[in-house]
Amino acid sequence: MIRPTPAIEAIPATTPFVGPEQLMREAGLRRLVRLGANESPFGPSPKAIAAMSAELERLGWYGDPESLDLRDALAQKHGCNQQQIVVGSGIDDVMGLAVRAFVAPGGVVLTTRGTYPTLNYHAIGYGARLEFADYRPDGTPDLDALLEIARRLRPALVYLANPDNPSGRFIGRDDMNRFCSALPHDSLLLLDEAYADFVATRDLLPLRIEERVIRMRTFSKAYGMAGARIGYGVTAESNVRTFQKIRLHYGINRNAQVGALASLADDAFRDRVVAATARARSDYYALASELGCGFIESCTNFVCLDMETAARATQVVNDLLRRGVWVRKPGAPPLDRYVRVSAGTEPMRRAFAGALRQVVAEVPA
Ligand SMILES: *Cc1c(COP(=O)(O)O)cnc(C)c1O
């Protein structure tokens, strides 16, 4: 009999992300308003689409295994050098590299219970031990709790998403500075900045190249290229050299490299997306007020609407899906009473608002 390793065999079967395609198949839906995965409804920059379309005929070739043109452009953007950048198939890939490179089996990975979960799957898959801090009651990651656990357990990795998903909360630079200095110096901070593009640069932690911090960014959100799968980490050269030993060298799609590079040259497009996203958030706040439900002010491309109990939030998600609108809800308290809806175009927002008005009227509070 062929068996996986005991460590892998011990992992419970799981499908962490049930995709909208699967939900449509199960529900027999032909169309779905996709507001469940924080994808950009605005897609990639037209310049990126043009560059990728022109590049398609060279799809017979592998992409540059060093992604050098892209890394040069990213180095310029961040004021560092290309040896301080590792490109991956999304942040999700970079997180896997970090766990594999820096956490020995049994080593501790510290995160927030209920935050973006991909790191947890990598940690489990590589035999690490997960430890959790809880969110603060308002849904902000609890830096003090993370610090307290980190001092006690000396984790190999500490994960923080800022802005956070699923809450949408953002921790400003002074608090982040204090947090970084107070972390044990032998813990590596994985700082997931998937939504950094939606925050003013002056509010972000300034970039300091340090061995003990990896800043992770993506083209999946503001740049609208989630399907291309490309993201990166900025960190010390020594860490990039470590990743160089284990990463999948042809793992970055050739077209994704070209599209990402062209995106970086179109700040005007990204600024329009950020502005349109802010309008979408305001629309959702107004809808929440109209329906008399609370919400969390968000610094991202999604908003959490308060359904008061986890059971009601689950029912609202299910009922919206029956009406052809896909949203998700956070899985852990204190956020599990919320429904999380991604920024959509105006027609998508109208579809969501129409369906939500009906559903909240039907589902008792
Ligand atoms: C969407 C998201 C990601 C995924 O990024 P990819 O680059 O598409 O892998 C990572 N972290 C957070 C917090 C996200 O919301």
Image (spheres, rainbow, N blue to C red):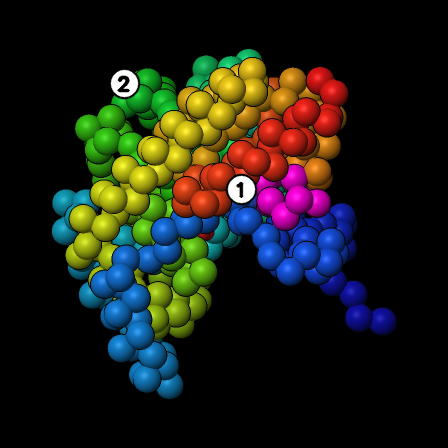
Mark 1 packing: few (<14 Cα in 10 Å), some, or many (20+)? some
How far apart are labels 2 and 1 at the CA level? 40 Å
Residue at numbered disc 2: 174
Region of the chain picked out in magenta, as a range: 320-328
Q: Residue 152, percent across and down?
A: 53, 20
Query: Is residue 77 placed above or below 179 in the rendered structure?
Result: below
- For the question of whether residue 131 can be seen, the reply is no
Quadrant where the C terminus is found in the figure: top right
- For label 1, the SS is helix
- For the question of whether residue 173 can be seen, the reply is yes
**Residue 116 vs residue 244: left or right?**
right
Q: Residue 352, percent across and down?
A: 54, 38
| Residue placed most toward the observer, 247 or 32 | 32
Query: Is residue 26 placed above or below 193 in the rendered structure?
Result: below
- For label 2, the SS is helix
Dot label at residue 351: 1
Instruction: Residue at 43% x, 68% y: name it.
Output: 251
Mark 2 packing: few (<14 Cα in 10 Å), some, or many (20+)? few
Nearer to us of marks 2 and 1 is 1
Query: Is residue 125 placed above or below 107 in the rendered structure?
Result: below
State which quadrant residue 21 falls in: bottom right
Amino acid type of disc 2? Asp
**Residue 298 vs residue 13: left or right?**
left
| Residue placed most toward the observer, 313 or 186 | 313
Say which label, 2 or 1, has the lower sequence index. Answer: 2
Q: Residue 11, percent across and down?
A: 73, 49
* Ligand 1 within 8 Å of the CB at mark 2: no
Instruction: Residue at 60% x, 45% y: name it.
Output: 326
Q: Residue 55, percent across and down?
A: 29, 77
Amino acid type of disc 1? Ala
